[in-house]
Amino acid sequence: MSDNRFADLTLPTRAARSFSVAALAMAGLLTLAHDASAQSLLNVSYDPTRELYREVNEAFAAKWQADGHDAPDIETSHGGSGSQARAVIDGLDAQVVTLALASDIDKIAETGKLPEDWQSKLPHNSSPYTSTIVFLVREGNPKGLNDWGDLLKDGVEVITPNPKTSGGARWNYLAAWAWAERNGQDPQDFVGQLYRHVPVLDTGARGATTTFAQRGIGDVLLAWENEAYLALEEIGEDQFDIVVPSVSVLAEPPVALVEGNIADEDQRELATAYVDFLYSPEGQALAYKHFYRAWDDSAADPEDVARFPDLELVGIDHFGGWKKAQPEHFGDGGIFDQIYTNADTASK
Amino acid sequence: MPGLGLSAGITLTMLSIVVLLPIGALLMQGAQFGLANIWDTVHRERVWAALFLSFRMALFAALFNLVFGVLLAWVLVRYRFPGRRIIDAAVDLPFALPTAVAGIALTALYAPNGVFGSLAQQIGWKIAYTQWGIFLALVFVGLPFVTRTVQPVIEEIDPEVEEASATLGASRSHTLRHVILPMLTPAALTGFALALARAVGEYGSVIFIAGNIPLRTEIAPLLIVIQLEEFNYDAAGAIGIAMLLMSFAMLLVINLIQIFSRKRIGHV
């Protein structure tokens, strides 16, 4: 903030002088708050990975020190995937991003902070772990909800967050779409009817879990598989059952180094080791433990691996990748928006 | 005037940093987007529905708070009863409580499986996840504004004024309408305007209790968040500007009414 920007203002000169003194003081405060150290790392992640990264950070720090380095200062921030991406775009100094959707990282790449082909830099589409969408139903499955088609039965209430605000909810929507395609139904019509069974559209996945589990609203929650298991663990296995539909999506929450935010070679080494750790047997075991489907189960507890049933998984490639699917389905005036505007014209 | 330079400098700087610059940035964003594009963004059924809902619910909640807040202030000032101080302190709670906490607490109480929600359910009244829920949350966040602006004015009113009115032969309702209320009107209107302005932009508490179904219970601030999620800063700015203009128009009307009422009843 320079003085000459205010020079045009017709303030009394004394006022203008104190104005700039105050501005200088302000600027001083802001610089004080910013003190970067090379051995620090900020991982900007999305909501349901809190428990996972708490353990990953501890395990990685121990390994890093055992390899003869100083103790690193690793921080992780969590929030909605989209708003986290926005924070990085707007200047949050993250060296690593671990978000829910590749499209969110694409948006960061558009600013030039990481290369456009970031997703090919690491194995498995840069996704060290994957998940899928399953149904969480009330104990004993009283409404008999076993597959996507059952969700349209009369009187069934479905809880899912708003795909416009929640990354996870986009996967829910796409999973329903994929099932309809495979079962000879018009997917647009099926998805439209599905959302007419939704009484509450929460803004995020955790909010939807609360609405379903704590408020007792709805008969089925469409949830991340890892969130569903977490809900069983936290709230009680005697209250809910997990139902795995015949078709679901292969959700790939990718990770990437934010090249533009890496200060020096030391930090690059740390950040690279951190991301590689996610792919190591030890990191993969932690992913399994936190109910993610990972790739390498050599160090994992067999029980953690065995709990995942097989089902047909459809990847985002089937929908033409996020670059195509995002605007087509969830963009302004896209297919999801039409569900509600059409519903309204129909009722008039 | 001594000290004018320094104090004006500090206040203007602070005002610029926290208020004027952000609003200026919003208007800049809008200016780049263009008036025609702003209109196209706002002139859609879903956006109108959300704007209409936000402003309508804010108005209802502020009207409710106007009546209930003045009543509460009157009771707190004029009566002495056990627990008065605790209730007096509790009025400030909506200021202090994070709105998300308030929203979650209200939802827990008024959801169909909550304490009050289950009672309301028995007479077929759904509160949480309907427009009633939005109303409830907005009443909660706006309540202190009216009470706290009216309270000092009531304290200033000497009970002897009422006695004088009575000795001159006025009935109680006549005294209330022609002596007490005119004195309270300007402060009550200020409180009403504050409560209204607060409620229009409220996001944190409403989002948990509203249900957020497009065209039915989707508030305008949520639409802004949705646009931001799509990295559509222009559209988010456009809806923000529309809300700003509507709020400005409303506050202008309220201020005009206030000036008018001041003139009519003379100096208070």
Image (spheres, coloured by chain):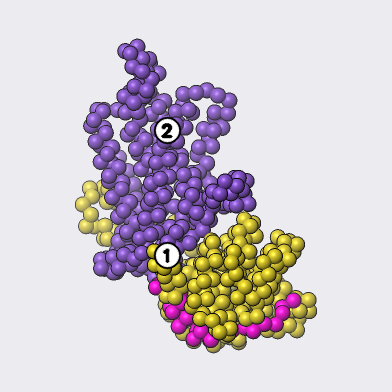
- Per the rendering, the colour in which chain B appears is purple
- What residue is drawn where x is 63% and y is 52%? B113
Callout 1 amino acid: Ser
Relative height, residue B56 to residue A155 (above, below) = above
Relative height, residue B106 to residue B227 (above, below) = above
Callout 2 amino acid: Val
- Residue span colored magenta: A307-333
- The CA distance from mark 2 to mark 1 is 42 Å
Relative to B24, A119 lies left or right: right
**Marker disc for residue A347:** 1
- Pointer 1 chain: A
Residue B227, position in %: x, y? 41, 67
- Label 1 crowd bin: few (<14), some (14–19), many (20+), radius 10 Å: few
- What residue is drawn where x is 46% and y is 44%? B139
* B150 in magenta: no
* A315 in magenta: yes
Residue A281, position in %: x, y? 71, 82
- What residue is drawn where x is 23% and y is 54%? A9
Relative to A137, A199 lies left or right: left
Q: Nearer the viewer, residue B114 or A53?
A: B114
- Per the rendering, the colour in which chain A appears is yellow
Q: Nearer the viewer, residue B124 or A216?
A: B124
Q: Nearer the viewer, residue B181 or A322?
A: B181
User: Looking at the figure, which quarter contains the C terminus of chain A?
Assistant: bottom left
Q: Are marks 2 and 1 in contact (CB under 8 Å)?
A: no
Residue A8, position in %: x, y? 21, 57
Q: Which residue has dot 2 on it? A: B70
Relative to A110, A205 lies left or right: right
